[in-house]
Image (tube, coloured by chain):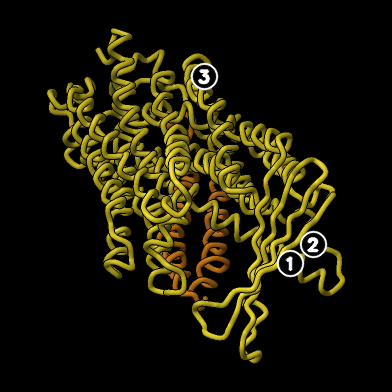
Chain colours: A yellow, B orange
Amino acid sequence: MNSVSNKKGLAGIIAASSVGTLIEWYDFYIFGSLAPVIATKFFPEGNPTLALLSTLATFAAGFVVRPFGALVFGRLGDLVGRKYTFLLTLVLMGLSTFLIGCVPAFETIGYLAPVLVLVLRLLQGLALGGEYGGAATYVAEHSPAHQRGFWTSWIQTTATVGLFLSLLVIISVKGMMNENAFADWGWRIPFWVSIIMVGISIVIRMRMHESPLFARAKAEGKVSANPLKESFGHRFNFKFVLLALFGATMGQGVIWYTGQFYALSFVQNTLWVDVSQASRLIMWALLFATPFFVFFGWLSDRIGRKWIMLLGMLIAVVCYRPIYSAMYNAGSVTQKQETDRSSSMQMAADLHHAGDSIRSTVTTYQYNDGTVMEETVKEKIHANPSMADSKKDIVRSRVVTLDEGSFRKLALLVFIQVIFVTMVYGPIAAFLVEMFPTRIRYTSMSLPYHIGNGIFGGLLPAIALFLTTKATQANEAAAKLGKELPYDKPYLEGLWYPILLAAVCFVIGALYINGKDRRIDD
Amino acid sequence: MNSIKKYLGFVWLALAAAAGYYLIISQAIPKFESDKPEDRIPAIIYAFILTPIIVGGLGVFGYYCLRGEYADDSKKQTL
């Protein structure tokens, strides 16, 4: 007996596991979503040490710590059991998140503040690294074989719903107070909310039983004595860890990040869309696409998991450039006709440098479809003209508020990308669980998942930005020399990273993955 | 099919080398040479964490392919 025959009992197990995982994703994302506010509180600009700590908090938690969490908690899960391990990750995540909301600002306790935030952020990454594998394994080991894809797909919805929930809570809290109050103390509320959700989830998880497959393996003395060595030290298992990474999770990771994060970054940074409008746009796309995780999980029980995931990768590879080209055409003000323009100018004293002043020019542009852009140019006027530096003295910012039609078009284009995400991500928990035997399952599946998502996916923003910047700079240099521009659409160059990785992953997955073995009671 | 799987191992080894070159030359070294202290963290991560994972992982994968470890008649992971 490796599954819960009672459907109601199984639904309870899924709900209990999913809520905990959802809260962990929520906790992980609110830090990212509130990064600009957190930066002003803990990592103020102009201090190189703080800039270093800030970068460490972003990179280390996203890239390095998650795979380590997978190793630490994966090992524990294969040694002592799934239930206690993912209870531990939940407590660790909940406490770290709550405490981030309690840390006094840099101006109150100095360098201790950013150091505490960094440590807590690292603990968050560690906990997340251990959570997913445990939840996916636990649910899969309770599910009947013919419905494993369907039941585990609920766990797959949690990453997207967690992102949705984090945006929703932040927008709600912002709506309850003015901007200054939110920047002052209101940003802490989303962190504190977490402790209530984690508390409820802990009570639910405490009542759960150990996975039947693990309990049986333990009773029969078949639990691995050294899961790390068995998973990665033996060629026999290690080759499947590599196959899971390069034939599945690498492509899945970049498609996940492109659809849910790069799309948001493109809308905000390339199209200059206002932050709250960009968040709403992503929220609509996520809301309508999320049920497809369950659909593709269900479908994978019927037609197999491998080709749904690989088809998702292939369609994404082919469609990314046309989709982002269409997003640019729908949202960029360079593609719209200007109908009206008005400007206003203000002078103010520079509070940081006596004698200097700041000239702010705000220009509002109206476009034919109702889109509005506000461009602010802040220029520092030095009392001593020899101090002038044209590169540093002028700061330009643009905020675009889209018309309803462009907003809907962009939401649809992001929705299509999230559908690709649901194709590659919906069936992957069941797929990974079925690749490895019970005794080393938690460890073996967690590492490729977190390298694929944390490293290959997490790298996406940095490498995409590098490629786009390089193309833009090459165009600018060519324009200066009066030569032909080398890049037709430089804003699409960042997409080569996910396209290349997903294409390689598709070939490896198509050729090397068997995908026919669905036994997990081994 | 097994021959294709096997000889594609050379492609994966070449890709591993190309990825290593790209990560070190285009990403890590310019960041090590940057004036900004915050660029050193990504540089360290590129050079000492990502490169070993990507180059080492894909390289070992290519090597296993060349050894025929992924041939259809090879034993499954679930003994």
Q: Position of residue A104 (x, y in %)?
A: 28, 60
Left or right for A202, reference A482: left
Give the vertical position of A457 relative to A343 (above or below): above
Q: Quadrant of residue A82?
A: top left
Q: Position of residue B22 (x, y in %)?
A: 57, 62
Disc 3 is placed on an element classified as: helix
Disc 2 is placed on an element classified as: loop
1 or 3: tag closer to the N-terminus:
3
**Are the numbered discs 1 and 3 placed on the same chain, yes or no?**
yes
Q: Chain of mark 1?
A: A
Q: Amino acid at mark 2?
A: Pro
In the picture of the structure, the residue carrying the numbered disc 1 is: A474
Give the vertical position of A363 relative to A238 (above or below): below
Q: Quadrant of residue A213?
A: top left
In the picture of the structure, the residue carrying the numbered disc 2 is: A486
Judge whether residue B68 can be spotted in this image.
no
Label annotation for residue A295: 3
Quadrant of the snapshot with the C terminus of chain B: top left
* Residue toward you, A219 or A88: A88
Q: Position of residue A341 (x, y in %)?
A: 80, 56
